[in-house]
Image (spheres, rainbow, N blue to C red):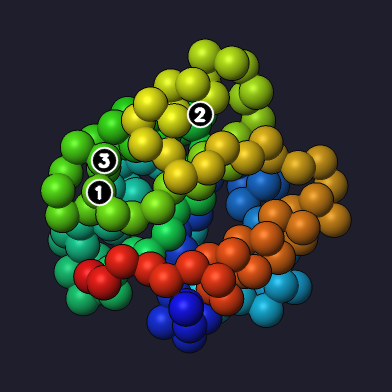
Amino acid sequence: MGDAGSLRILLVEDNEVDARLTLRAFDEAGIGGCLEHVLDGEQALQRIRRDGAYADESAIDLILLDLNLPRVSGMEMLRELKGDDSHRVIPVIVLTSSMADEDVAEAYRAHAAAYVAKPVGSEGFVAVAESVRDFWVTTVTRAPR
């Protein structure tokens, strides 16, 4: 089973309001210290690969990914990540406002672990954070890295 102290979650979200709601929700769920935030897919890939300024950072264990991102879209990032043997095992939860059938299907074809609609309001974000905590911290055995 997981350990919240060692879990590293990367939030890839360009909307500052949604990012603040997510960060606050994870704090309320007791796992805010696990969460890092980047603004776009390019920065996320650098962080995941531990390139440049991220060279001394811990490995990422879980990704919360918005699809609508600048520079490198969430879907492009997901495809690139899952096409890389060394990072393929990192679960990606798509957390986005798009509920278009084609986006959901494409995300799962690109090997997203889950597809979650962005909640409305702070209570909804807390519920998502608690679900992540309950499943990814207390239930799942993560792949060794």
Q: Earlier in the sequence, mark 2 or mark 1?
A: 2
Q: Amino acid at mark 2?
A: Asn
From the image, tell me which residue sits under label 1: 88
**Badge 1 vs badge 3, beta-carbon distance below 8 Å:** yes
Label 3's element?
Answer: helix
- Is 41 or 62 nearer to us in this picture? 62
Quarter of image, res 62: bottom left
Nearer to me, 127 or 35: 127
Q: Looking at the image, is mark 3 or mark 2 earlier in the sequence?
A: 2
At x 52% / y 14%, what residue is drawn? 102
Distance between the alpha carbons at the discs numbered 3 and 2 = 18 Å
Residue 70 visible: no
Instruction: Report whether residue 145 is seen.
Output: yes
Give coordinates of residue 19: x percent, y percent: 62, 52
Frontmost residue, 117 versus 39: 117
* Quarter of the rendering occupied by the C terminus: bottom left
Vertical relation: 31 (above or below) 92: below
| Marks 1/3: CA–CA distance | 4 Å
Q: Residue 139: where, in percent of width, then height?
A: 55, 71
**Disc on the earlier residue, 1 or 3:** 3
Q: Nearer the viewer, residue 35 or 88?
A: 88
Is residue 5 depicted above or below 138 in this figure? Answer: below
Badge 3 amino acid: Lys
Task: Identify residue for label 3.
Answer: 82
- Looking at the rendered structure, the secondary structure element under dot 1 is loop
Q: Residue at x 56, y 37 (%)?
A: 115
* Depicted 29 relative to depicted 82: above or below: below
Would you name the residue on which mark 2 appears?
68
